[in-house]
Amino acid sequence: MAKKLKAGDVIRGYRIAKVFGPGMMAISYAALSPSGAKVFFKQYKSPAPTVVWYKDFVAYQRELSARVGSGRVGNFAVRQVDAFEEAWGGRCYFQAYEFVENGADLQQVLDAEHEQHRQTKVAPTRDTVVWARHVTWAKVLVSGIAALHEAGIVHADLKPANAYLVEDRTIGSGYQLKLIDMDFSLLADQRAPWHGYQGYVGTDNYRSPEHLVRGGVPTKASDVFTCGLILHELLAGQHPYWSEDQAEYARQVQAYAAGPPALAGLMPAPADNAEVSQALHRCLSPDAAARPSAAELRSVLSGLGKSASVPKMPPTAAGVPRPPLVAGALVLQTPDGRSLRLGVRTELGKALMRQFGQDAEFWDHRQCVVERNADGRWILIPVSPTTNETLINGRALTNASTLSSGDQIAVGREAKGIAKLPLTVRAG
């Protein structure tokens, strides 16, 4: 049976300098490598070499390490520098990672901010300096997740404690981000070796809907969900679903209980508060397909993707763009005068459209979502994949779009000029 290392022990040339303590799957240490470099050292308790999926786990870790070591993701994730099997009382698997220091994880930083502002009774995000810092961290975090996903990796256990911030004034953002604790992250295109043998790693109050379903497998969209929770903390000042009772947390997650958040400050131009609020709300959708991608979220936070992600409103006869529809309710009207009035978030699909005739069969059961954002504007959000495209004014809808009175919603094919069951938007 393998035994625990202690300070001063040497294994495969690595000298243990400090014992950090046991985790669920491994014991962690600070160590000096054979070259004298400081490393973060892990001794695995699970899987043990006797476990049926152990060899596949080692191969999986090798591929995960190779992906982190290549491309942009290497700028955002801690790199593995060594991995080997060795006997220490018994056979055991070890990994060594680059050591990150001179910073703090995001949870520590947020806790320190709250303690600093506790006496003033002013939320940290109401401080303009803190707000600017949070916006920067939000952008860096989302860029890191986007890079991870580009490499085909799902972190699967995102939380503030797994985002390590290192101040670096030599780069534009001012901070390096290192995503840590990725030894049980997933390859998006390969099934995990432990699937069917044990569950997927997750943390209380940061589990995605996929973590909460028996047999569910975390995906890139799961990272977007948990990233959305962290962005709520950074930009809106609070976790939307925090609960000491994890059954209550799960109930709120599955009920989509949170609305679009009110941001604690003004997003720097060209980003738009309403668009950011809407994107953060979409991150928390129980439907993974309705969440934005990390790349889309990055564009919304920077404001750089607005022209590409939101279809332009058709001009009026005078050539002036239509204003956004701000109303307590909206009406969808067919060409023959029949109408549907909506005052709350509503999923539009086949069942609801059948009242308007046979062309409802061209709609999917879940085609798109209409909802009102934090500043009262009505938004149309696509759901994917669908058999036919959701069209707004004849153009395929690929991202959330602000609605205006006179806009026309339909389904069909933009390239072929086909639009079925057109519905004109009016104030209700």
Image (cartoon, helix red, strand yellow):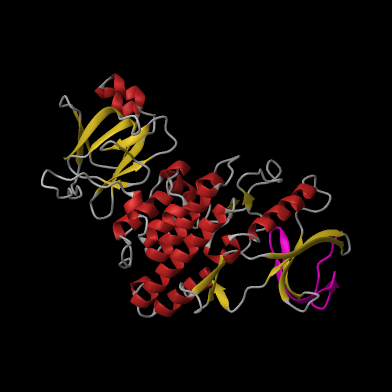
Residue 212 visible in the current orientation = yes
Q: Residue at x 71, y 73 (%)?
A: 39
- Nearer to the camera, 316 or 252: 316
- Quarter in which the N terminus is drawn: bottom right
Which corner quadrant of the image does residue 255 belong to?
top left
Task: Check the image and report above or below for 319 versus 166.
Answer: above
- Nearer to the camera, 304 or 237: 304
Please give the range of residues in magenta.
1-27
Q: Would residue 423 be found to the left or right of residue 298 on screen?
A: left
Which corner quadrant of the image does residue 261 belong to?
bottom left
Would residue 149 be counted in the magenta stretch?
no
Task: Check the image and report above or below for 54 versus 160.
Answer: above
Q: Would residue 100 be found to the left or right of residue 330 on screen?
A: right
Residue 242 visible in the current orientation = no
Q: Residue at x 37, y 40 (%)?
A: 382
Q: Residue at x 54, y 58 (%)?
A: 147
